[in-house]
Image: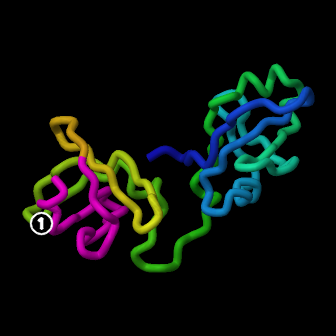
Amino acid sequence: MSDLVVIGKVSSARGLKGQFKIISYTKNAEDIFNYGPITIGDKYIDVQLSKVSTTKNLLVASVHEIDTREKAEDIINNNITVKTHKFPEISEDGQYYYYQIKNMKVMDESCKIIGEVTNIANYGANDVIEITDENKRTFFIPYSKNVIDEVDVKNNILKVKNISDYQ
């Protein structure tokens, strides 16, 4: 598992002084500014992200090291990442960060590996887990007690049940 988690993305440059617009993937958009040093792409490592303003759907940010429009344009479409140890511990049983579940092997009731978690998304009602099987086919299951039997972070296994209707 990587030590970095994507928490946002640079969408465009703004102005002449190196400011840029970002899309935040954090639950509350402005939380992206609370993680301390972040990394943008592979060029800006452990830099401090500062909030400049908000626009209709995006945040405007800056970092000290990016001080021209050209430098801001250089990072368009780059991911904004943070080290996993920056995330607070989750104290509730049954709650996990997406990065902990992504890439887990998926095991059915008969202990057969049926695929790997390739993505997790939330479309409003429930989280939905995308699984890719050995034939590169994908299918989706809801993240619910009726389907998820156990999340074994230590062994990187997601144990599922009652999924025949989803395959």
Number of labels in the image equals 1
- In the rendered image, the vertical position of residue 114 relative to residue 71, given as above or below: below
Extreme-bottom residue of the structure: 92
The residue singled out by tag 1 in the image is: 109
Is residue 119 rendered to the left or right of residue 39?
A: left
Residue 89 percent across, percent down from the top left: 56, 70
Residue projecting furthest to the right = 17
Q: Where is residue 74, by image quadrant? A: top right
- Residue located 34% across and 56% down the image: 129
The one nearer the camera, 42 or 161, is: 161
> Which element type, helix, strand or loop, lies under badge 1?
loop
Percent coordinates x, y for residue 148 in the rendering: 27, 69
71 or 1: which is nearer to us?
71
Describe residue 5's horizontal placement relative to residue 18 as left or right. Answer: left
Q: Is residue 70 above or below residue 83?
A: above
Q: Which residues are magenta?
A: 139-167
